[in-house]
């Protein structure tokens, strides 16, 4: 897959660090390996927004590392992997969904899903803040709620911790998100952006745990679900599923 606008500096995997003087290269191929119901679904969604079906997708049945291909095992045994191959045959691999979203949106500026990285703009600052807020604060809180209330529900859970994160999410996070959605309809204003791939997935995860039930969130999910890329990314999944997968449980019960 090649795009004339998909030009960005990539670090080859076998280098000790990034060369800030490296010449931009064209992306030749994109491949994402992941289970369909984890946070890297954000990257799947964004890839469909950017290149339709012009990327390789390897799905696995569960987050169990033993079911991943050699590509995933080589890069990170416990996480999804995005592989980016440039025109010279070099490749780089990423396994953090927020980083994938930022890089991919910047790599295809003609799609208009991210404010340009330079020069400085208030829109870019707000956009990055939302992406990282979703990938850190929101993810952490929802993960803690899931661990305490779902994964460890049969024993070993800390009801106080789970309840604290639930109360904080509903009392502090939801009002911030509602203000944004009621004001503009999307994560960063009146237009869909790559930040909505982060926030939209977070809202779906929250709703699966009984959070984000206000009309503003329902209307937001309805808007997102009308996008073809959303439908392609989440085909077959009515919602983000909260499951008690053994590979997730073991680190908390050993």
Image (cartoon, rainbow, N blue to C red):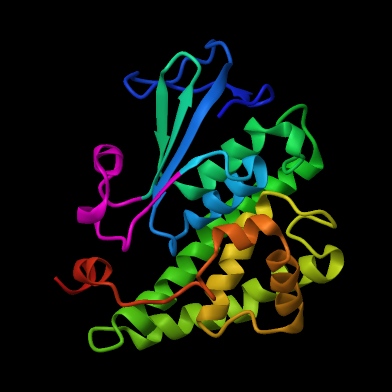
Residue at 31% across, 63% down:
62
**For residue 252, what is the image quadrant?**
bottom left
Residue at 63% across, 60% down:
230
Q: Position of residue 246 (x, y in %)?
A: 22, 71
Total number of numbered discs in the rendering: 0
Residues shaded magenta: 57-79
Q: Position of residue 91 (x, y in %)?
A: 41, 25
For the N terminus, the image quarter is top right
**For residue 8, what is the image quadrant?**
top right
Q: Inspect this view and state whether residue 145 appears.
A: yes
Q: Does residue 73 lie above or below 41 as drawn? A: above
Residue at 58% across, 36% down:
103
Q: Position of residue 115 (x, y in %)?
A: 76, 39
Residue at 83% across, 71% down:
182
Asked if residue 68 lies in the magenta stretch, the reply is yes
For the C terminus, the image quarter is bottom left
Q: Is residue 166 left or right of residue 154?
A: right
């Amino acid at each position: 897959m090649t795009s004339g606008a998909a030009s960005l500096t990539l670090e080859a995997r076998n280098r000790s660090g990034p060369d800030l003087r490296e010449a931009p290269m064209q992306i030749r191929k994109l491949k994402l390996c992941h289970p369909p119901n984890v946070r890297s679904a954000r990257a799947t969604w964004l890839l469909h927004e950017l290149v339709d079906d012009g990327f390789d997708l390897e799905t696995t049945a569960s987050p169990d590392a033993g079911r991943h291909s050699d590509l995933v095992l080589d890069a990170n045994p416990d996480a999804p992997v995005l592989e980016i191959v440039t025109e010279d045959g070099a490749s780089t691999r990423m396994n953090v969904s927020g980083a994938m979203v930022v890089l991919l949106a910047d790599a295809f500026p003609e799609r208009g899903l991210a404010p340009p990285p330079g020069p400085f703009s208030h829109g870019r600052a707000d956009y990055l803040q939302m992406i990282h807020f979703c990938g850190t604060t929101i993810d952490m809180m929802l993960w803690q709620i899931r661990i305490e209330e779902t994964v460890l529900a049969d024993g070993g859970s800390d009801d106080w911790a789970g309840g604290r994160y639930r109360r904080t999410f509903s009392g502090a996070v939801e009002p911030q998100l509602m203000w944004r959605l009621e004001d503009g309809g999307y994560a960063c204003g009146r237009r869909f952006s790559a930040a909505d791939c982060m926030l939209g997935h977070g809202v779906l995860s929250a709703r699966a745990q009984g959070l984000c039930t206000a009309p503003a969130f329902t209307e937001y999910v309805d808007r997102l679900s009308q996008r073809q890329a959303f439908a392609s990314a989440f085909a077959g999944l009515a919602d983000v599923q909260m499951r008690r997968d053994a590979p997730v449980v073991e680190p908390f019960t050993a």
